Image: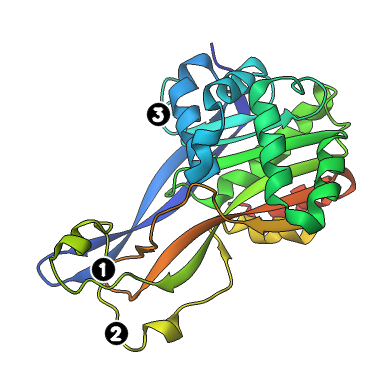
Amino acid sequence: MSQKRAHDAEMHSASDASDASDASSINSTVDVDFEFFAPHPTDFHSIKRLLQTSFGDDSEDFDLSELTDLILEQATIGSTVKTDGEEGDPLALLTVLDLTTAHRDTKVVEQITEYLIKKAGAQMKDQVAQILGGRAGLLVSERIINIPPHVVAPMLRMLTDEMKTAELCDFEHYVLICPMYTETAAIEEDSDDESNKKKPLVTVRRNKNAAAKTSEQPSYLHPEDEFIEEFACLKFDYKFTRSKRAAESRNSFTDTGLAPSRRCLVIHKSNLSQLVDRLNDILAP
């Protein structure tokens, strides 16, 4: 049976409902009870889907089934968030995996290590290789889009307590892959000719002011990652290897699209406790 974590949280999530008749937006508040559970074998497929989201377009480059198995094998480390009891599907996951000692020789850890070293680029390649060759832990933090960031603070605090109990607190560095996005001009759809039929279905018509609304600076998809960055000793951005998608439109009322990317943050162990306190202060429900 899955172990229920000590922290339950009742939080409020806001949702927007659109009235088709008058195109007006209605704000509503829904009470949701979030419960924290240890990863359980029945969570395999849900956890694997969360991992696919974490690695984005390049998820095919990793043996995510093996990675999911590694997460489930260390059931006393990490937490999932559910709203339908322990039999429900995990809506969020936070855990840490040993990239150096316990799992060094596994296929997926080799894939992740080689991938991050390559993505670090020429300037940081040697530094990242040295970090990943030492005592490094991969922080896996992912959730579905409508789960609020407030769940992260208790999950991270529980994780640090669990690492101490399991004597896994000797990581020198923690590596976190953060989802990013950049606003870009959305695809212009001019006609229904054969060339346009090959384009993505999600398109909007640009106007002459669209360029002024876009930004070349990537933004965090998970708002808490902005505060985590304050404690990073190293960071680098990278684009997907397999990404051939054009930027999708944000919604029907904007002239900008979203181009996904990733940012890798490396946190030294000396900053971890301060990071936990910072997120607890900011994200406490």
Which is in the foreground here, disc 3 or disc 2? 2
Residue underneath mark 2: 207
How far is mark 3 from mark 2, CA to CA? 45 Å
Q: Is residue 48 left or right of residue 275?
A: left
Q: Residue furthest front?
A: 194
Dot 3: element: loop
Which residue type carries mark 2?
Answer: Asn
Q: How far apart, in angstroms, are the residues tagged by discs 1 and 2? A: 14 Å
Q: Is residue 233 visible?
A: no
Q: Residue at x 61, y 51 (%)?
A: 178
Amino acid found under the numbered disc labelled 3: Asp
To which quarter of the image does residue 229 belong?
bottom right
**Amino acid at pointer 1:** Ser
Of the pair 6 and 220, the residue shown nearer to us: 220
Q: Secondary structure at mark 2?
A: loop
Residue at the extreme left of the image, as rendered: 21
Residue where numbered disc 3 is placed = 84
Sequence-wise, the earlier of marks 1 and 2 is 2
